[in-house]
Amino acid sequence: PLNIIACENMVRGTTQLKGHVMNALPEDAKAWVEEHVGFVDSAVDRIVPPSASATNDPLEVTVETFSEWIVDKTQFKGT
């Protein structure tokens, strides 16, 4: 099995991704994907507060220390 989790800040983001994937698949592949691929919805809670960078690195990101990742365990395949 393959389990896919879209870590996006949106409600049921992985379910929306699944819809796009299924629409792009040929009909004969859809049943296999339904059986073997889990599309697991999640909620990511991690705040990236605005801050003035201490460096000139454009890729520097400052985040709060708290984080939480909630997933819908019922959507996993092969567990």
Image: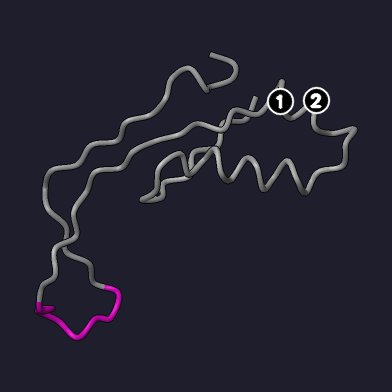
The stretch of residues the image draws in magenta is: 52-59
**Main structural element of the magenta stretch: helix, strand or loop?**
loop
Q: Which residue is situated farthest in the bottom direction here?
A: 56
The amino acid type of the residue labelled 2 equals Ala
Please state the horizontal and vertical placement of residue 67, each as a whole percent of the image: 19, 42
Residue that appears at 30% across and 74% down: 59
Left or right, 9 with reference to 36: left
Q: Quadrant of residue 60?
A: bottom left
Q: Which mark is residue 34?
A: 1
Asked if residue 26 is positioned above or below residue 35 in the image, the reply reads below
Neighbours of disc 1 within 10 Å: few (<14), some (14-19), many (20+): few
Tell me if residue 62 comes above or below residue 79 in the rendering.
Answer: below
Q: CA distance from mark 1 to mark 2?
A: 5 Å
Q: Is residue 40 within the magenta segment?
A: no
Q: Position of residue 36 (x, y in %)?
A: 69, 24
Callout 1 amino acid: Glu
Q: Residue furthest right?
A: 28
Q: Kindly identify the residue that appears in the image at 84 percent across and 34 percent down.
A: 29
Q: In the depicted view, which residue is nearer to us: 55 or 74?
A: 74
Give percent across and percent down for residue 76: 53, 22
- Which residue appears at 53% of the width and 13% of the height? 79
Q: Residue at x 11, y 48 (%)?
A: 65
Q: Which mark is residue 31?
A: 2
